[in-house]
Image (spheres, helix red, strand yellow):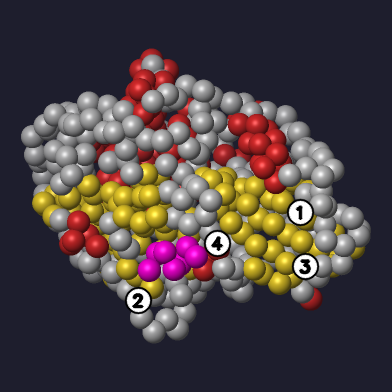
Amino acid sequence: MSAPAIRHGGPSGRLPTRQGHHFMLTVEPPGRSFATSATTPNVPKTTLPSYPGMHRLYSRPFRGEPQFLGVSSSPHILPSALHGPEDRRWNSMRSHSHRPPLLSLRGRPPQLQPLLAPSAPAIGFASQASSTSEMQMSRTSDRQSPIPLRNFGNTCYMNAIIQCILHSPWLFSSLAETHAWSKRPLATSALLELGAARVDAPGQLLLTVKGEAAKFNAEFQDNGQSDAHEFLRTFLFVVHSEINTSGGHNTPYEELKEVENESEEEAMRRWQEHYLRVDNSIIYDLFGGVMRSRCVCSSCGKVSLTFDPFLDLSLPMIPGARKAATIESMLNISFDEAEEKLRGGNQLLCARCRRLRNGTRSVKIIRWPKILVLHLKRFDDTGKKNSEPVVFPESFMTHGNSPMQYQLYGVVCHSGSENWGHYTSYVRTLSGRWYHCNDAVISLSTVTEAMQALTTAYILFYAVK
């Protein structure tokens, strides 16, 4: 058996870059046969087939749109030193625009006592601080109805994401039990306070969340219209950076050496040990999965493996489908059926042959997360929206040697076009009730109603049953 060449990928998102731990999502030209939010596996000096990148902003001002203060424009809302130094900011690529609601209702319903959530099986990235008892939902992290969230003019994208994060199983108990109040940074503290049984100043907490996201991503520095998926990835990275129990970006880079005749399982084990010395947090415990890319040289048969952690998966829409696509079929096409041929300008650089060679490349999910976030790529690289229906079930089973059963608990919807639009969300509380969240307007709903959002569903949140 040829020895696999282990290469280290990186988590999803346009994150600060450090040699050897790639936290940068690059925008790539069209042509990739599959797409995920994890970074493209590293085949040195080889440009692999790529997929359309993040969504650019095609903004047309909406007449009558309310103009509120941006989070960085008032020293009375947030500290004047809102934004971090330039080297901490993400390179902004504007997303398509979204129309905010013209009116947000004030007030919020009474905060009621939550229920406990069942514990989750121990899969994904295992934090040393995690245990079965810690995987119980905090009594202050859920309520019988979601809290209304104010729209500050164009922040419906943030409100829709925050509602789904607030209803993510196991997250708040893990954060509360492993991080003392005195040591909690701003974003983590604001998130925990928003998830408390009673919230005194949700508007101020939202501004804190937005301000912390703006330090890492210039997209959120003003009060412009932004993409919900981009905010999700930014915010998860912000919280991860705050609570990372490993060395993070200060850890010296260490190259993983090849081991002759090493099995894929052993290579994966060595990679995970290496990775956890750099990035280890509750965010990756819950949302983190692992993707394996396998490249094979057609000349000598050498196998090169790349392991990439991810926090969400982006699924391309199926072109020319005669009937509505399903997320099961989209996952199968992206990760089970696709074997990419590397030819011509897409040849791989074989370490054994020491030259460009033809080859094949396949991608597979080898570790599914406890919380699976699926992003439907409804916008192409020109910003055009695909509103074809996508069927997503209340529960489904993954394929592979260790299948996982997931249950739906959140749906982020985008209504509108590439020129304007509005975000809302459906969330399931621990009591089993479903609610529709439209900024400050919270209404009782059903899972059937949520699953009928076939043409507007944009981000799906599933948790292991």
Q: Could you tell me which residue is drawn at 32 percent across and 68 percent down?
A: 391
Task: Please provide percent x and percent y for residue 131.
Answer: 42, 24
Residue for badge 3: 359
The residues tagged by marks 3 and 4 sit, at their Cα atoms, a distance apart of 18 Å
Residue for badge 1: 304
The residues tagged by marks 1 and 3 sit, at their Cα atoms, a distance apart of 11 Å
Task: Please say if 137 is above or below 8.
Answer: above
Task: Please say if 349 is above or below 273.
Answer: below
Q: Could you tell me which residue is drawn at 39 percent across and 32 percent down?
A: 187
The residues tagged by marks 1 and 2 sit, at their Cα atoms, a distance apart of 36 Å
Residue for badge 2: 324
Residue for badge 4: 335
Q: Quadrant of residue 119?
A: top left
The residues tagged by marks 2 and 4 sit, at their Cα atoms, a distance apart of 19 Å
Q: Residues within 10 Å of mark 2 (few under 14, many from 20)?
A: few
Identify which amino acid the numbered label 1 is placed on. Answer: Ser
Q: SS at mark 1?
A: strand
The residues tagged by marks 3 and 2 sit, at their Cα atoms, a distance apart of 33 Å
Q: SS at mark 4?
A: helix
Task: Please provide percent x and percent y for residue 102.
Answer: 17, 60
Say which label, 1 or 3, has the lower sequence index.
1
Task: Please say if 206 is above or below 192.
Answer: below
Q: Could you tell me which residue is drawn at 83 percent across and 61 percent down?
A: 301
Say which label, 3 or 2, has the lower sequence index.
2
Say which label, 3 or 4, has the lower sequence index.
4
Task: Please say if 321 is above or below 141.
Answer: below
Q: Are marks 1 and 2 in contact (CB under 8 Å)?
A: no
Say which label, 2 or 4, has the lower sequence index.
2
The residues tagged by marks 1 and 4 sit, at their Cα atoms, a distance apart of 17 Å
Q: Is residue 375 left or right of residue 141?
A: right
